[in-house]
Image (cartoon, grey):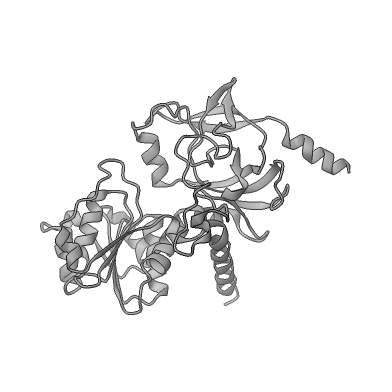
Amino acid sequence: MSSSISSINRSSQIITCNAAVAWGPGEELVMEEVEVGPPQPLEIRVKVVCTSLCRSDITAWQSLATPSIFPRIFGHEASGIVESVGQGVTEFQKGDHVLTLFTGECLTCRHCLSSKSNLCQNLGLERKGVMHSDQKTRFSIKGKPVYHYCAVSSFSEYTVVHSGCAVKLRPDAPLDKICLFSCGVAAGLGAAWKVADISKQSTVVIFGLGTVGLSVAVGAKLRGASQIIGVDTNSEKFEKARSFGITQLVNPTDHEEPIHQVIKRMTSGGADYAFECVGDTGTVTNALLSCCDGWGVTVTLGVPKVEPEVRAHYGLFLSGRTLKGSLIGGWKPKSDIPKLVDMYIRKARAELYC
Protein backbone atom coordinates (compact mmCIF):
# COMPACT_ATOMS: atom_id res chain seq x y z
CA MET A 1 0.00 0.00 0.00
CA SER A 2 2.84 2.40 0.86
CA SER A 3 4.38 2.12 -2.63
CA SER A 4 0.98 2.85 -4.17
CA ILE A 5 0.57 5.96 -2.03
CA SER A 6 4.10 7.03 -2.93
CA SER A 7 3.28 6.69 -6.63
CA ILE A 8 0.12 8.80 -6.22
CA ASN A 9 2.01 11.51 -4.35
CA ARG A 10 4.71 11.56 -6.98
CA SER A 11 2.18 11.97 -9.78
CA SER A 12 0.68 15.05 -8.10
CA GLN A 13 3.97 16.91 -7.67
CA ILE A 14 5.60 19.60 -9.80
CA ILE A 15 9.21 18.76 -10.54
CA THR A 16 12.02 20.96 -11.79
CA CYS A 17 14.57 20.00 -14.41
CA ASN A 18 16.73 21.40 -17.18
CA ALA A 19 15.41 22.02 -20.68
CA ALA A 20 16.62 23.70 -23.86
CA VAL A 21 14.21 26.60 -24.29
CA ALA A 22 13.70 28.67 -27.43
CA TRP A 23 12.60 32.17 -26.43
CA GLY A 24 11.75 33.31 -29.95
CA PRO A 25 11.79 32.21 -33.60
CA GLY A 26 15.36 31.37 -34.60
CA GLU A 27 16.78 32.50 -31.26
CA GLU A 28 19.52 30.42 -29.70
CA LEU A 29 18.27 27.70 -27.38
CA VAL A 30 19.01 28.43 -23.72
CA MET A 31 19.38 25.83 -20.97
CA GLU A 32 16.83 26.82 -18.35
CA GLU A 33 15.42 25.36 -15.17
CA VAL A 34 11.77 24.62 -15.88
CA GLU A 35 8.87 23.40 -13.80
CA VAL A 36 7.12 20.34 -15.17
CA GLY A 37 3.56 19.89 -13.96
CA PRO A 38 2.09 16.56 -12.91
CA PRO A 39 0.41 14.35 -15.51
CA GLN A 40 -3.30 15.02 -15.82
CA PRO A 41 -5.90 12.32 -16.52
CA LEU A 42 -4.74 9.90 -19.26
CA GLU A 43 -1.24 11.47 -19.31
CA ILE A 44 2.18 10.19 -18.29
CA ARG A 45 5.29 12.03 -17.18
CA VAL A 46 8.45 10.68 -18.76
CA LYS A 47 12.13 10.94 -17.90
CA VAL A 48 13.72 11.48 -21.31
CA VAL A 49 16.69 9.16 -21.80
CA CYS A 50 17.49 9.84 -25.46
CA THR A 51 16.19 12.31 -28.01
CA SER A 52 17.16 13.01 -31.60
CA LEU A 53 17.02 16.13 -33.73
CA CYS A 54 14.63 16.19 -36.66
CA ARG A 55 14.67 18.72 -39.49
CA SER A 56 11.07 19.63 -38.67
CA ASP A 57 12.22 20.80 -35.22
CA ILE A 58 14.56 23.26 -36.93
CA THR A 59 11.88 24.32 -39.42
CA ALA A 60 9.40 25.10 -36.65
CA TRP A 61 12.08 26.83 -34.53
CA GLN A 62 13.04 29.12 -37.41
CA SER A 63 9.48 29.77 -38.58
CA LEU A 64 8.03 33.25 -38.15
CA ALA A 65 4.50 31.95 -38.74
CA THR A 66 3.71 31.35 -35.05
CA PRO A 67 5.66 33.92 -33.00
CA SER A 68 3.12 33.73 -30.18
CA ILE A 69 3.99 30.10 -29.36
CA PHE A 70 7.18 31.04 -27.52
CA PRO A 71 8.99 30.41 -25.24
CA ARG A 72 8.91 26.82 -26.43
CA ILE A 73 10.61 23.47 -25.91
CA PHE A 74 11.20 21.56 -29.12
CA GLY A 75 12.00 17.90 -29.78
CA HIS A 76 9.58 15.13 -30.73
CA GLU A 77 11.68 11.96 -31.17
CA ALA A 78 12.42 10.44 -27.80
CA SER A 79 12.71 7.33 -25.69
CA GLY A 80 12.44 7.38 -21.94
CA ILE A 81 11.16 5.90 -18.69
CA VAL A 82 7.76 6.57 -17.15
CA GLU A 83 8.23 8.62 -13.98
CA SER A 84 4.55 8.89 -13.00
CA VAL A 85 1.08 8.39 -14.45
CA GLY A 86 -2.11 10.39 -14.33
CA GLN A 87 -5.58 9.31 -13.34
CA GLY A 88 -7.17 6.69 -15.57
CA VAL A 89 -3.91 5.44 -17.10
CA THR A 90 -3.89 1.64 -17.13
CA GLU A 91 -1.55 0.92 -20.04
CA PHE A 92 1.58 2.33 -18.38
CA GLN A 93 3.14 2.24 -14.94
CA LYS A 94 6.17 3.80 -13.33
CA GLY A 95 9.40 2.35 -14.71
CA ASP A 96 8.04 1.35 -18.13
CA HIS A 97 10.28 2.09 -21.10
CA VAL A 98 8.42 4.14 -23.70
CA LEU A 99 8.72 5.80 -27.07
CA THR A 100 7.01 9.15 -27.55
CA LEU A 101 4.78 9.81 -30.58
CA PHE A 102 4.25 13.19 -32.23
CA THR A 103 0.91 11.95 -33.54
CA GLY A 104 -1.14 9.58 -31.44
CA GLU A 105 -3.77 6.92 -31.78
CA CYS A 106 -6.93 7.10 -29.70
CA LEU A 107 -8.20 3.79 -31.14
CA THR A 108 -11.81 5.02 -31.26
CA CYS A 109 -12.15 7.80 -33.87
CA ARG A 110 -13.12 7.34 -37.52
CA HIS A 111 -9.52 7.43 -38.74
CA CYS A 112 -8.19 5.08 -36.06
CA LEU A 113 -10.90 2.56 -36.92
CA SER A 114 -10.15 2.76 -40.64
CA SER A 115 -7.45 0.69 -42.32
CA LYS A 116 -7.11 3.49 -44.89
CA SER A 117 -5.58 6.06 -42.53
CA ASN A 118 -2.99 6.46 -39.80
CA LEU A 119 -4.31 9.85 -38.69
CA CYS A 120 -6.21 10.45 -35.45
CA GLN A 121 -9.00 12.97 -34.98
CA ASN A 122 -8.40 13.26 -31.24
CA LEU A 123 -4.62 12.94 -30.87
CA GLY A 124 -3.34 14.18 -34.23
CA LEU A 125 -0.60 16.72 -34.85
CA GLU A 126 -0.81 19.37 -32.12
CA ARG A 127 0.09 22.80 -33.53
CA LYS A 128 -0.86 25.21 -30.73
CA GLY A 129 1.92 24.36 -28.26
CA VAL A 130 -0.40 22.83 -25.66
CA MET A 131 -1.68 19.45 -24.52
CA HIS A 132 -4.49 17.69 -26.37
CA SER A 133 -6.63 17.13 -23.28
CA ASP A 134 -7.11 20.62 -21.82
CA GLN A 135 -5.31 22.98 -24.22
CA LYS A 136 -2.86 23.96 -21.48
CA THR A 137 0.89 23.59 -21.06
CA ARG A 138 2.66 21.44 -18.48
CA PHE A 139 5.86 23.54 -18.58
CA SER A 140 6.53 26.85 -16.87
CA ILE A 141 9.37 29.13 -15.81
CA LYS A 142 8.71 31.20 -12.71
CA GLY A 143 5.01 30.68 -13.16
CA LYS A 144 4.90 31.74 -16.81
CA PRO A 145 3.92 29.16 -19.45
CA VAL A 146 6.45 27.50 -21.73
CA TYR A 147 4.88 25.90 -24.78
CA HIS A 148 5.16 22.37 -26.12
CA TYR A 149 6.09 21.14 -29.59
CA CYS A 150 3.96 18.39 -31.14
CA ALA A 151 2.75 17.62 -27.60
CA VAL A 152 6.12 15.96 -26.89
CA SER A 153 8.92 18.51 -26.15
CA SER A 154 11.76 16.06 -25.67
CA PHE A 155 14.51 18.68 -25.34
CA SER A 156 13.77 18.53 -21.63
CA GLU A 157 14.93 16.12 -18.96
CA TYR A 158 11.28 15.40 -18.17
CA THR A 159 8.15 15.85 -20.23
CA VAL A 160 4.44 15.06 -20.10
CA VAL A 161 2.66 13.31 -22.97
CA HIS A 162 -0.81 11.88 -23.50
CA SER A 163 -0.87 8.13 -22.97
CA GLY A 164 -2.19 7.82 -26.52
CA CYS A 165 0.99 9.50 -27.75
CA ALA A 166 3.40 6.90 -26.39
CA VAL A 167 4.09 3.21 -26.88
CA LYS A 168 5.46 0.79 -24.34
CA LEU A 169 8.79 -0.75 -25.30
CA ARG A 170 10.12 -4.17 -24.44
CA PRO A 171 12.73 -3.86 -21.66
CA ASP A 172 15.60 -5.04 -23.87
CA ALA A 173 15.06 -2.33 -26.51
CA PRO A 174 18.15 -0.05 -26.65
CA LEU A 175 16.78 3.39 -25.82
CA ASP A 176 19.71 5.18 -27.49
CA LYS A 177 18.75 3.73 -30.87
CA ILE A 178 15.02 3.20 -30.59
CA CYS A 179 14.30 6.93 -30.23
CA LEU A 180 14.80 7.23 -34.02
CA PHE A 181 11.68 5.11 -34.51
CA SER A 182 9.62 8.01 -33.13
CA CYS A 183 9.84 9.71 -36.51
CA GLY A 184 12.76 9.45 -38.94
CA VAL A 185 13.33 5.70 -39.28
CA ALA A 186 9.63 4.82 -39.12
CA ALA A 187 8.82 7.53 -41.66
CA GLY A 188 11.39 6.29 -44.18
CA LEU A 189 10.68 2.59 -43.86
CA GLY A 190 6.94 3.10 -44.01
CA ALA A 191 7.15 5.37 -47.04
CA ALA A 192 8.99 2.60 -48.89
CA TRP A 193 6.93 -0.34 -47.65
CA LYS A 194 3.42 0.93 -46.95
CA VAL A 195 2.92 4.16 -48.89
CA ALA A 196 4.84 3.43 -52.10
CA ASP A 197 4.83 -0.37 -51.70
CA ILE A 198 8.09 -0.72 -53.65
CA SER A 199 8.20 -3.76 -55.91
CA LYS A 200 11.12 -6.06 -56.65
CA GLN A 201 13.59 -5.03 -59.38
CA SER A 202 12.21 -1.48 -59.43
CA THR A 203 14.14 1.79 -59.79
CA VAL A 204 14.11 4.28 -56.93
CA VAL A 205 15.39 7.84 -56.51
CA ILE A 206 15.67 9.49 -53.11
CA PHE A 207 16.06 13.25 -52.70
CA GLY A 208 17.74 14.01 -49.39
CA LEU A 209 20.06 11.61 -47.56
CA GLY A 210 19.36 12.34 -43.93
CA THR A 211 17.80 9.88 -41.49
CA VAL A 212 14.53 9.71 -43.43
CA GLY A 213 16.14 9.32 -46.85
CA LEU A 214 18.55 6.63 -45.67
CA SER A 215 15.67 4.77 -44.05
CA VAL A 216 13.83 4.85 -47.38
CA ALA A 217 16.98 3.36 -48.94
CA VAL A 218 17.01 0.52 -46.41
CA GLY A 219 13.35 -0.16 -47.11
CA ALA A 220 13.94 -0.14 -50.88
CA LYS A 221 16.90 -2.50 -50.54
CA LEU A 222 14.91 -4.93 -48.43
CA ARG A 223 12.14 -4.87 -51.05
CA GLY A 224 14.64 -5.87 -53.75
CA ALA A 225 14.91 -2.62 -55.74
CA SER A 226 17.52 -3.01 -58.47
CA GLN A 227 18.59 0.64 -58.67
CA ILE A 228 18.55 3.07 -55.73
CA ILE A 229 19.75 6.57 -56.60
CA GLY A 230 20.55 9.04 -53.84
CA VAL A 231 20.43 12.77 -54.54
CA ASP A 232 21.95 15.33 -52.18
CA THR A 233 23.85 18.61 -52.43
CA ASN A 234 26.24 17.47 -49.69
CA SER A 235 28.68 14.96 -51.17
CA GLU A 236 30.13 14.24 -47.73
CA LYS A 237 27.08 12.06 -47.09
CA PHE A 238 27.79 9.77 -50.02
CA GLU A 239 30.19 7.28 -48.43
CA LYS A 240 27.82 6.51 -45.58
CA ALA A 241 24.85 6.41 -47.96
CA ARG A 242 26.35 3.47 -49.81
CA SER A 243 26.28 1.39 -46.65
CA PHE A 244 22.50 1.91 -46.46
CA GLY A 245 21.90 0.44 -49.90
CA ILE A 246 22.29 3.42 -52.24
CA THR A 247 23.69 2.15 -55.55
CA GLN A 248 24.32 5.48 -57.32
CA LEU A 249 24.82 8.98 -56.00
CA VAL A 250 24.21 12.37 -57.59
CA ASN A 251 25.02 15.90 -56.46
CA PRO A 252 22.78 18.30 -58.46
CA THR A 253 25.43 21.03 -58.25
CA ASP A 254 27.75 18.86 -60.35
CA HIS A 255 25.38 19.01 -63.33
CA GLU A 256 24.36 21.86 -65.60
CA GLU A 257 21.11 20.23 -66.73
CA PRO A 258 18.07 19.96 -64.42
CA ILE A 259 18.31 17.11 -61.95
CA HIS A 260 15.15 15.39 -63.23
CA GLN A 261 16.72 15.08 -66.67
CA VAL A 262 19.79 13.49 -65.10
CA ILE A 263 17.61 10.98 -63.29
CA LYS A 264 15.56 10.21 -66.39
CA ARG A 265 18.74 9.44 -68.30
CA MET A 266 20.06 7.22 -65.51
CA THR A 267 16.78 5.27 -65.30
CA SER A 268 15.98 5.01 -69.02
CA GLY A 269 12.96 7.30 -68.86
CA GLY A 270 12.24 7.89 -65.20
CA ALA A 271 12.22 6.10 -61.86
CA ASP A 272 9.42 3.82 -60.74
CA TYR A 273 9.45 5.52 -57.34
CA ALA A 274 10.73 8.91 -56.15
CA PHE A 275 10.93 10.13 -52.57
CA GLU A 276 11.24 13.74 -51.39
CA CYS A 277 12.94 13.72 -47.97
CA VAL A 278 14.18 17.32 -47.84
CA GLY A 279 11.24 19.49 -46.86
CA ASP A 280 11.16 21.61 -50.01
CA THR A 281 8.22 21.88 -52.40
CA GLY A 282 10.53 22.62 -55.33
CA THR A 283 12.14 19.26 -54.66
CA VAL A 284 8.70 17.65 -54.66
CA THR A 285 8.25 18.95 -58.20
CA ASN A 286 11.69 17.63 -59.22
CA ALA A 287 10.87 14.24 -57.73
CA LEU A 288 7.59 14.13 -59.65
CA LEU A 289 9.40 15.06 -62.87
CA SER A 290 11.94 12.29 -62.20
CA CYS A 291 9.26 9.59 -62.25
CA CYS A 292 8.32 7.60 -65.29
CA ASP A 293 5.09 7.99 -67.21
CA GLY A 294 2.31 5.49 -66.68
CA TRP A 295 2.99 4.32 -63.13
CA GLY A 296 5.61 6.56 -61.54
CA VAL A 297 4.91 7.25 -57.85
CA THR A 298 6.31 10.18 -55.89
CA VAL A 299 6.09 10.25 -52.10
CA THR A 300 6.73 13.45 -50.17
CA LEU A 301 7.85 13.19 -46.55
CA GLY A 302 9.49 16.54 -45.74
CA VAL A 303 8.08 19.60 -43.98
CA PRO A 304 8.77 22.75 -46.05
CA LYS A 305 10.10 25.92 -44.41
CA VAL A 306 8.70 28.24 -47.09
CA GLU A 307 6.35 28.06 -50.07
CA PRO A 308 4.08 25.24 -48.88
CA GLU A 309 2.26 25.01 -52.21
CA VAL A 310 3.42 22.32 -54.63
CA ARG A 311 3.52 23.35 -58.30
CA ALA A 312 3.17 20.79 -61.05
CA HIS A 313 1.80 20.75 -64.57
CA TYR A 314 -1.47 18.83 -64.78
CA GLY A 315 -0.05 16.84 -67.69
CA LEU A 316 2.20 14.95 -65.26
CA PHE A 317 -0.88 13.45 -63.63
CA LEU A 318 -2.71 12.83 -66.89
CA SER A 319 0.30 10.77 -67.99
CA GLY A 320 -0.17 8.45 -65.03
CA ARG A 321 2.11 9.81 -62.34
CA THR A 322 0.91 9.76 -58.73
CA LEU A 323 1.88 12.10 -55.87
CA LYS A 324 1.36 10.84 -52.33
CA GLY A 325 1.92 12.36 -48.92
CA SER A 326 3.25 10.35 -46.01
CA LEU A 327 3.02 11.00 -42.27
CA ILE A 328 5.23 8.74 -40.15
CA GLY A 329 5.36 6.31 -43.04
CA GLY A 330 1.68 5.44 -42.99
CA TRP A 331 2.09 3.44 -39.78
CA LYS A 332 -0.62 3.49 -37.14
CA PRO A 333 1.65 4.73 -34.34
CA LYS A 334 0.63 2.66 -31.31
CA SER A 335 -0.38 -0.40 -33.31
CA ASP A 336 2.51 -0.68 -35.77
CA ILE A 337 5.66 0.90 -34.34
CA PRO A 338 6.17 -1.78 -31.64
CA LYS A 339 6.29 -4.31 -34.51
CA LEU A 340 9.10 -2.29 -36.13
CA VAL A 341 10.99 -2.29 -32.85
CA ASP A 342 10.62 -6.09 -32.64
CA MET A 343 11.91 -6.44 -36.22
CA TYR A 344 14.94 -4.30 -35.39
CA ILE A 345 15.80 -6.28 -32.26
CA ARG A 346 15.44 -9.63 -34.05
CA LYS A 347 17.74 -8.45 -36.84
CA ALA A 348 20.27 -6.99 -34.38
CA ARG A 349 20.39 -10.28 -32.46
CA ALA A 350 20.71 -12.32 -35.64
CA GLU A 351 23.69 -10.21 -36.72
CA LEU A 352 25.22 -10.49 -33.25
CA TYR A 353 25.21 -14.27 -33.34
CA CYS A 354 26.29 -14.68 -36.97
Judge whether residue 218 can be spotted in this image.
no
Left or right: 91 as drawn, with respect to 245: right
Residue 163, image x and y in percent?
62, 47
Q: Relative to the observer, which residue lies in front, 132 or 275?
A: 132
Identify the residue at horizontal 54%, vertical 25% (top origin). 145
Residue at the farthest right position: 1
The residue at the point 72 percent across, 49 percent down is 95
Q: In the image, 177: left or right of 232?
A: right
Residue occupying the point 15% across, 70% down: 265
- In this view, 106 is above or below 199: above
Q: In which quadrant is the N terminus drawn?
A: top right
Q: Quadrant of the C terminus?
A: bottom right
| Image x and y of residue 277, in percent | 33, 55
Q: Position of residue 162 (x, y in %)?
A: 60, 44
Residue 2: percent from left, percent from top: 88, 41
- Left or right of 17, for residue 109: left
Q: Quadrant of residue 199?
A: bottom left
> Most extreme residue toward the front, as rendered?
110
Q: Residue furthest left?
A: 256
Q: Is residue 111 above or below residue 35?
A: below
